[in-house]
Image (cartoon, rainbow, N blue to C red):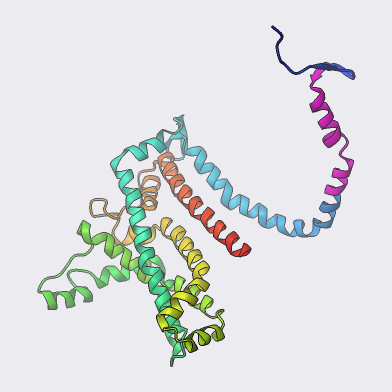
Amino acid sequence: MRQMVPEVKENPENSSIKTYPGALTFLKKHVFSSKGLRDKFSTKLKKNSLPLAFLSPAVIFVLLITFLPILHAISISFYETSYLQKTEFIGFHHYWNYLQEPAGRQNILNSLIYVFGSLILAVPFGVLLATLLHRNLRFRTLFRTLIVLPWVVAQLISALLWSWLINPNYGPVNYFIQLWFGFPVDFLSQPLTAMPTLILVNVWRSFPYPMLLTLAALQTIPEELLEAAKVDGASAWTRFWRITLPLIQNTLLIAIIMLSLYYFNMVTLPLVLTGGGPLGATEVISLRVYREAFNFYHIGYGSAIAIYILLFNILFSLLYIKILRTEAVG
């Protein structure tokens, strides 16, 4: 039976090299005889040489401070480690082990609750304040300055401030709670109240970010459009829902994505305010990475967990890029 195989011919210039006639024709047409392609590439390179010269230091700098640490973290996550030394190659064992342990799954669940719980509160609150501050109010500049202050306060200071405010022994918040209900509440020592408290403190610190973005987006909406809707009898809620919100939705989506990345990587606020407790109720993924790497010196295991955060960040970054492309096409 005749076998259906491609015909193989010897290269007349080199009998030791055997090639397919179609492939040889393709190479001659597109590679060996690509003088035009080389000239085109050379022309573009000469034309863009100055911008490339200016961009190259920034590109090299970004590669050094961004991609090299990531590559090193990925590399070390496949090894058992003793401090910073690699001892044994174990492949994906750290990745699988983290998903198998109950604490790892609890970390992921805590992170999702922390991120989306903060987003649900911070973004609508920021939009509400931006809508109010967009109106002609007296002392509007003073209000804007005061409202932005939590955003410029460091996470460490925010955590210490709220630890003092809600302290069950001498905190002002618990003082009033004790006056009204007759007993203080230790918000940070109960699993049911620790995570909501951590989310509220995070919302208090981060709501100015969506507020500023929304305020900037509101200033781009033509006043004539809103006035025309008002003349047609549209209520304030209808004007906001039908006109304002569609015009600022891309800005809101960008704020949501950026805040999601920020919340996933946050360490200082949970570490100082709750320390991950009680009973691991507020231990998010980023805090677990910090503990494994710098408290227990499990560098390989901590690197593997950090890669999970990287995957979450990539997922949200892709969504962010998709939104930008949609906005550009629109």
Task: Looking at this view, name the residue that lies furthest to the top.
Answer: 1
284 inside magenta stretch: no
Q: Which is nearer the eye, 2 or 286?
A: 2
Query: Along the horizontal axis of the image, is 18 left or right of 155?
Result: right
Q: Indicate the position of residue 68 as horizontal and vertical percent values.
A: 58, 46
24 inside magenta stretch: yes
Give the quarter of the image for residue 221: bottom right
Above or below: residue 170 compared with residue 72: below
Q: Is residue 152 visible?
A: no
Q: Indicate the position of residue 25 as horizontal and vertical percent values.
A: 84, 29
Is most of the magenta stretch helix, strand or loop? helix
Q: Count all numbered tags in the image, as a single digit.
A: 0
The residue located at (26%, 73%) in the rendering is 165
Above or below: residue 157 compared with residue 261: below
Give the quarter of the image for residue 185: bottom left
The residue located at (81%, 18%) in the rendering is 17
Q: Indicate the position of residue 199 as horizontal and vertical percent values.
A: 32, 64
The residue located at (80%, 56%) in the rendering is 49
**The C terminus, quarter of image:** bottom right
Task: Looking at this view, name the residue that lies furthest to the bottom.
Answer: 138
**The N terminus, quarter of image:** top right
Q: Which is nearer the eye, 88 or 148?
A: 148
Query: Along the horizontal axis of the image, is 275 left or right of 69?
Result: left
Q: Indicate the position of residue 318 as horizontal and vertical percent values.
A: 53, 53
Task: Looking at this view, name the residue that lies furthest to the front.
Answer: 232
Q: Is residue 28 visible?
A: yes
Above or below: residue 154 compared with residue 191: below
Q: Which residues are magenta?
A: 17-41
